[in-house]
Amino acid sequence: MRYLEPGEEVVYEERPHSAALAGPLLRALLFTVLGAALVLGGSALTWGLGAAGALLLAVAALLTLLEVWRWDRTHVVVTTEKLFVVSGLAQRRAAAVRLARAGVVEMEQDALGRMLGYGTITAGNLEIPYVADPDRVCALAG
C-alpha cells in the first residue's frame, strides 16, 4: 500500500460495513419499482411512460453499480502509526490521523449499529462512519 511509511505495518484493513449500502440501495430499489411500474403499465398509447420507466430502470442499475463500486473501493486502515480511510473511484483520496497526535479515539454506535456490528470512529478531526467491528478498531488505534 502506497500510503505506508518505511517500517509501518498494517494491523487492520477492512471495507466499511455493508450497512453503508442500505440507503443507496433503497433509493435504487425505489427507482426500480417506479420504473417497472411505468414499463409494465405503459401501453401503445402511452409509449412515453414505458420509455420513462426504462430510463428509471437504467438509472437504478447505474446508481447500484456506482454505490457498490464506491463501497468496494473504500478501506479503513489502522497501521502501527496511523488511522486512515482511503476512498475514491477515479481519483483515490486518503484522510489520515497519526495515532500519537489523535488523542482519544472514540466510537459511537446506535442500536442498529450494535445489532449489526458497525459504528462511527472519531480520532482527532477524522470521522469514519460504518466501521465494521468498531470495538476492535478502537482497541488497535487507541
Image (cartoon, helix red, strand yellow):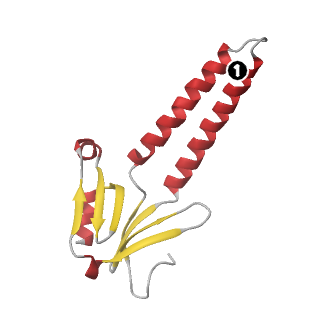
Q: Position of residue 70 (x, y in %)?
A: 53, 54
33 or 82: nearer the viewer: 33
> Disc 1 marks which amino acid?
Leu
- Residue shown at 26%/70% (left/top)? 140
Q: Residue at x 73, y 25 (%)?
A: 51
Q: Position of residue 131 (x, y in %)?
A: 34, 56
Q: Where in the figure is residue 2, as x and y percent of width and height?
A: 51, 78
Mark 1 surroundings: few (<14), some (14-19) or many (≥20) residues within 10 A? some
Task: Say above or below: 6 vs 31.
Answer: below
State the image coordinates of residue 96 (x, y, percent, origin top left).
Answer: 39, 74
Q: Position of 140 compared to 30: left or right?
A: left
* Residue at image coords 74%, 12%: 43
Left or right of 105? Residue 34 is right
Helix, strand or loop status at disc 1: helix
Label 1: which residue? 49
Q: Quadrant of the C terminus?
A: bottom left
Give residue 52's quadrant in the image. top right
- Vertical order, 12 against 63 (above or below): below
Q: Is residue 86 above or below residue 62?
A: below
Residue in view at x 67 percent, y 25 percent: 53
Q: Nearer the viewer, residue 94 or 9?
A: 94
Instruction: Count the marks.
Output: 1
Q: Residue furthest bottom?
A: 6
From the viewer's perspective, is 77 left or right of 124?
right
